[in-house]
Image (cartoon, grey):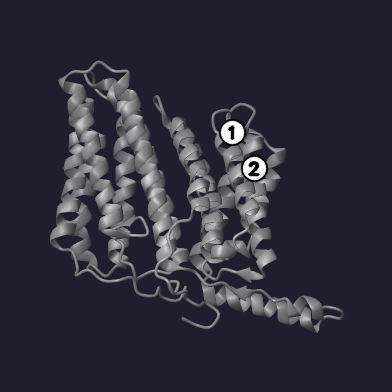
Amino acid sequence: MTESTPAASAPAGGERHASWLELFFDLTAVAGVAQLAHLLHGSPGWDDVALYAVMFLAFWTGWMLFTVYGNVSGDEVRTWTVLAGMFGMAVMAASVHGVREDRAGAFALAYILVRSLAGKAWERRGEYVPELPITQLGLGLTPWVVSMWFDGTERYALWALGLLIDLTVMFSVSGTRLAARVDARYAREAREPGSGRRAAAKPEAALMDAPHLGERLGLFQLIVLGEAVAQVVAAASQAEWDAALYSVGAGSFLLLLLLWSLSLRHGADGVPLLAWDVLPVRLVLPPHCFVAGAVAALAAGLGDAVEYTHHPVPEPVRWLLCGSLAVYLAVAGVAALCSGRGVPGTLLLVGPSLAAVLVTGAAARQAGAAHLVWLLVAAAAWTRLVAERRRPGRRGRPARPAP
């Protein structure tokens, strides 16, 4: 680590765990994930999937900003700041249902306010997070502001543009580059007349508690998996209970169990097959979002599949199930490569599973829900089995590499 990108160690009394305030804040994630999953119910088209992806990424971004704020602030966190962010995210969640009618503006405005509130929180602390460059580089928020004067597809496209800018910043601006930007900006202001006071208030690089953040990211994945369980239970409670339903229910439960194991027992920070010590936080966060979004989409598909225990699953639902699991496995493959498993090892881990899922999506046109779900179980089970057999020796959580 460089001086501008310090790594936090665990507190003197041992590792931190999520506080009551943080767990209360996560209730908005529970509500938001549940609402977002409803965008994919029925027979979703590509436009529905695209809108879901944009809105999920926006909601996750708000959650992540306040999660990192709580991680860095620790006991100094401002409760009312977190609660205000929680209220803004609750408005975002409540806006999902009518986003295609008259609530898109409310969703965008709530997102803008959540982002602005998070930025003010860092400004008040006089700190910045080297591993979270979007707290200092807010260009991605501009398209959201502009979108307030547009409707329909143009508005959604502007949202997507803003999020694409944020993702580009996350992947391309390292902690060292961000620290250099901050130093250069305040050095420039120091040379300007009457700016000495501002230069003296140059923000400091904030410390992050890596184990605590890993726990928070893992908890979010548990929330998403819990939503998947809730979707299946809700659908099963209204269906006829017979052997076909029992098969779908058992398969769905086993599939979610396998994903839980891959993400939280064979992964790090909620990202399947990722080792603890290979990536800085700024590169862990995007795949964490992609995995969570894929599992939430899978949850919607499993809930819909229960309705087709005696009929072929419609193509949109079939591809929702297969496509979401394919995204999950693809991210797992990238994580495995980054974790030093090598190309042959990664292909063995996820290659057969990914191929099986894609073939199922393309060819299983007459498959009922039970057959389809158990094919997905078999695909996920292969990756889980190989990961267990080729599992590296257990290690502690070393300090993260410099971002």
Label 2 is placed on what type of residue?
A: Ala
Please tell me which of labels 1 and 2 falls first in the chain.
Answer: 1
191 vs 340: above or below: below
Q: Position of residue 98 (x, y in %)?
A: 58, 28
Name the side, left or right, on which 252 lies relative to 175: left
* Left or right: where 22 falls relative to 189: left
The residue to which callout 2 is attached is: 110
Residue 375, percent from left and from top: 18, 37
- The correct choice, above or below, for 97 with respect to 108 in the image is above
* Residue located beneath label 1 in the image: 95
CB under 8 Å between discs 1 and 2: yes
Residue 280 location, quadrant: bottom left
For the question of whether residue 359 can be seen, the reply is no
Q: Say which mark, if any, is on residue 309.
A: none
Residue closer to the observer: 322 or 67 = 67
The quarter of the displayed image where residue 250 is located: top left
137 and 67: which is toward the camera: 67
Say what amino acid the circle numbered 1 marks. Answer: Ser
The answer to whether residue 194 is left or right of residue 28 is right
- In the picture shown, does residue 18 fall above or below 11? above
